[in-house]
Amino acid sequence: MEYPITQDAGLEARDDRLVTDSARTDRPTPDVDVVVVGAGIAGLYLAYRLSRAGHRLRVFEAGDDLGGTWYWNRYPGARVDVPSIDYMYSFDPNWQRDWQWSEKYATQPEILRYLNHIADKHDLRRHITFSTRVRQAGWDDGASLWRVRTDGGDDVSARFVVMATGCLSMPKQAEVDGLESFTGEVYFTSRWPHDPVDFTGKRVAVIGTGSSGVQSIPVIAEEAREVVVFQRTPTFSIPARNGQVSPERLALFAANEADYRSAARMSPGGIPMERSITPTFSVSEAERQQRYERAWGIGELFEAINVYADVLSNPAANHEFAEFFRNKIRAIVDDPQTASDLCPTDYPVATKRPCLDTNYYATYNLPHVRLVNVRKHPIRQITETGIDTAHEAFTFDAIVFATGFDAVTGAITAVDITGRDDAALKDKWADGPQTYLGLTTAGFPNLFLITGPGSPSVLSNMAVSIEQHVDWVLDCLGHLRAHGFAAIEPTAMAEAGWTQHVNDCADITLFPAANSWYMGANVPGKPRVFLPYPAGVDFYRATCDEVVARDYLGFKLSGPEGSMCNDGLVRRLQPDVEMILIQMAAMNLPTLDSMPVDEARAFYAQMSTTRPPGPDVGEIVDGVLPGATGDLAYRLYRPPTPGPHPIVVFFHGGGWVVGDAVSDDPLCRDLCVRSDAIVISADYRHAPEHRFPAAVDDAMAAVRWVADNAEALGGMPGRLAVCGWSAGGNLAAVVSRLTRDAGGPHIVGQVLLTPPTDGDLTRASYVENADGYGLTTALAQWCYDHYIDPADRRDPRFAPLCAGDLSGLPPAIVVTAEFDPLRDEGKAYAAALDAAGVPVEHVRARGHTHQSLTMVDVALSGAPVRARIANALRGFFLPTRTPETAA
Ligand code: N01
């Protein structure tokens, strides 16, 4: 059937007029503008966009036909695990006129038919050279072009190379000894024959229980006489509940397909869905079970994982969800030992790709299906007739390997790619891939990676992510043309920043806890690096768009008429901190400095009620202690371990104006548990009613009282440290010096968390971070003005940095946050302590704000900093630091 070549108005409007490089320069004209490697979903869309934009292109495809993943993975039961109508192109808006999905989750043959249908409809085949593998691509810097060689003898020059090689296309080696001796049939799910395979009456082994194994095992078991599944790691799988395409989804399409697709693009996973913001333990047990049941019943992976906001970050939340899964498995599988072997226990749920199945667990109830737990009974070797484990010799007619892929990077590094100075990409990535946005890599100009490492790729609906990348590349090529540039390449700084950002995102999740292919852990010798970008399609797309809007931030663009580079980092905040700031901004809350003091205090207290409580401690005691002029409230946090314990006197934050003994409750709990010390949060009088030095006098009184009563409080006399956040950090620093001068009480260490140390508003950090990061410069000034007269601001009881002599002060840990107006004075104080010979550890909290380090269980990226604080406290409390031994 012939289809007219359609042109979408939107695309037409976006493409710039073609001006070839040769028209501008006398440099050699490449054979084509773009070489595309791969003719799967990405390669086809590239062919569509590039050809319509007037680029001369060639697409090389190793397979005999198009389809990529869907060409190769023809194993029995192969299906998509994203609903079919989400897993399709959006550039073909009138698709329903000539295409219909027959099922919620289409089979491999149906998807392959769809891709062929699209290729024919838009006349894409003519760009593709089949049965041809790209072996080599080398950047010729002098000519500013790529030289691409194939196993078919092609030698093609191109201005750009786009790797559309797929994330799961390079099969992993079998890694079992003796395969060559087996005389029966051998199959790999990833390279399944085109002719039908008939297992009727046969004894079949299946090795591997990832998605491919989970899908194929039930179907193979329908034919085979005997099926033995060799399982190394059990998987979490939910029933797909396949059937007709959901009428609700179709109705959404009928209402407005453009809105639907746009919602997908701005969703966390590439399927229209609201990001869950409910923490698991914020609702009742009954409600949680109800929601888990719904997740199990709906048959959609993304929905299931989105059940609660913290499933992938909170170990306890993950454990509960995993236990729900395990109970389901135990309920389905009759044999208790088999059920137990099928229950994953050594990695958090969803940190390895979960599966969608049809009758997977129930298949193990069939009399001719058996599970062998390879962890208990390792495969020794494959023999002529079957498989030997340490305990048993099995005879098979066929062995099916469903053993997975060298994922995400494997297909890219399989091509010998060399960039500037003949540097090999494989060498550059030897310790893990480095990319900018997962799209480009420094030193390899004009090379684009579709769904490359460092982009959402395999954690998202690939169809949506592929389109986004291809659109970005096409826009980029249009930009280069329009501005007379011939080459684009990321800077080393931008790439390092992005690689760091991807790691930061992964580090606040449970993903690194699993030996998954996401981590490269399934391939022996592959570096352990989290490969995809886990913060979501929505954030990722916004970032890519921002890079363009900021004049291709982090890229160097060059051409015959010159070059431009707007170098920098697109994401500098910790990802969770950024998310919190976005949410706070959306709430449009009034600022404290816009309110009368009483209102500000009430508002501050109100805000505290909505945060997570922090960890459980052994005991909490509320009491009063004698302050300088009257009673002061305190709260004591005792660790769950047997005492006596060292004691930390803690001073809360709040700019000397707001807050009280319990306002930093989660932080105090966290410090108590992590450092195994009693934390006593002592209140002090607040300004403006009680201006400087009232708070200092109270802080001194509190330290004296705690020192005098250490034993009665369950503490260890002589092991006393001070700690404070913000204004409390200032008080801790001041008290450390005053006690030194007064000859006691002896303080073994001081913890100063984002402290003001001289309130000098002219410092750079007050200017750089004046607004947008929680504490504003205006609010800091409001606090100072309430607390202290300008004339007193060099008094060392306010400005410890102005104290003449800092020698002999207790050892310190000073924490400064990158995006804090107070950053530079904390930094200066750490340097001054160091210069005075005081042992000091200065922790620069990268990507953090004034408050974020105190946000226990909210800003998870703050936890390692608090762990360092606790570690420092433990060091302060070592017996060598006590007065007796110090003397
Ligand atoms: O591969 P896998 P897959 N001895 O790596 C085991 C997508 N996909 O092809 O975990 C014994 O997940 C290995 O064990 P372990 C989807 O994203 C999607 O199944 O390494 N066992 C594991 O059990 C998916 O995640 C769809 O300990 C060995 C299995 O083999 C990705 O592709 C369908 C072994 C490999 O599982 C990959 O899935 C199919 C050995 N030597 C795939 N080596 C859908 O859309 C490996 N294993 C539904």
Image (cartoon, rainbow, N blue to C red):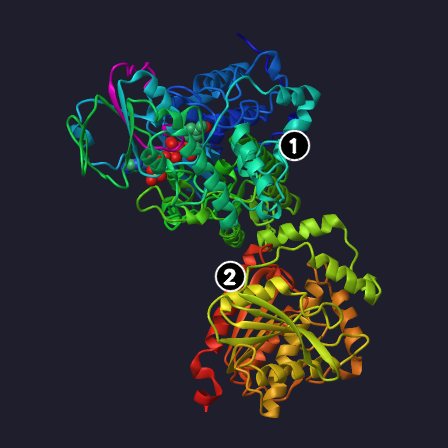
Is disc 2 placed on a helix, strand or loop?
helix
Sequence-wise, the earlier of marks 1 and 2 is 1
Q: Position of residue 377 (x, y in %)?
A: 23, 39
Q: Position of residue 98 (x, y in %)?
A: 58, 11
Between marks 1 and 2, how big is the CA–CA gap?
35 Å
Ligand 1 within 8 Å, label 2 CB: no
Res. 386 in view:
yes
Is disc 1 placed on a helix, strand or loop?
helix
Can you identify the residue that label 1 sits on? 263
Can you identify the residue that label 2 sits on? 864
Question: Label 2 sits on what residue type?
Answer: Pro
Residue found at x 40% / y 42%:
516
Ligand 1 within 8 Å, label 1 CB: no
Ligand 1's quadrant is top left
Q: Which of 178 and 631 is in front in this view?
A: 631
Q: Which residue lies furthest to the right in this view?
A: 596
Residue found at x 66% / y 78%:
731
In the image, which is nearer the foreground, mark 1 or mark 2?
2
Q: Nearer the viewer, residue 462 or 83?
A: 83
Image quadrant of residue 598? bottom right
* Helix, strand or loop for the magenta stretch, by majority: loop
Question: Label 1 sits on what residue type?
Answer: Ala
Q: Nearer the viewer, residue 854 or 744?
A: 744
Q: In the displayed structure, would residue 270 be above or below residue 660?
A: above
Image quadrant of residue 726? bottom right
Residue found at x 70% / y 84%:
697
Q: Where is residue 720 in the image (x, y as percent from the top left)?
A: 54, 80
Query: Horizontally, is 52 left or right of 610 in the view?
Result: left
Q: Could you say which disc has been placed on residue 805 in the image?
A: none
Q: Position of residue 604 (x, y in %)?
A: 74, 61
Write the start and end of the magenta stretch as one range: 193-213
The local crowd at label 2, few if under 14, some if 14 to 19, many if 20 or more residues have their Cα within 10 Å, is few
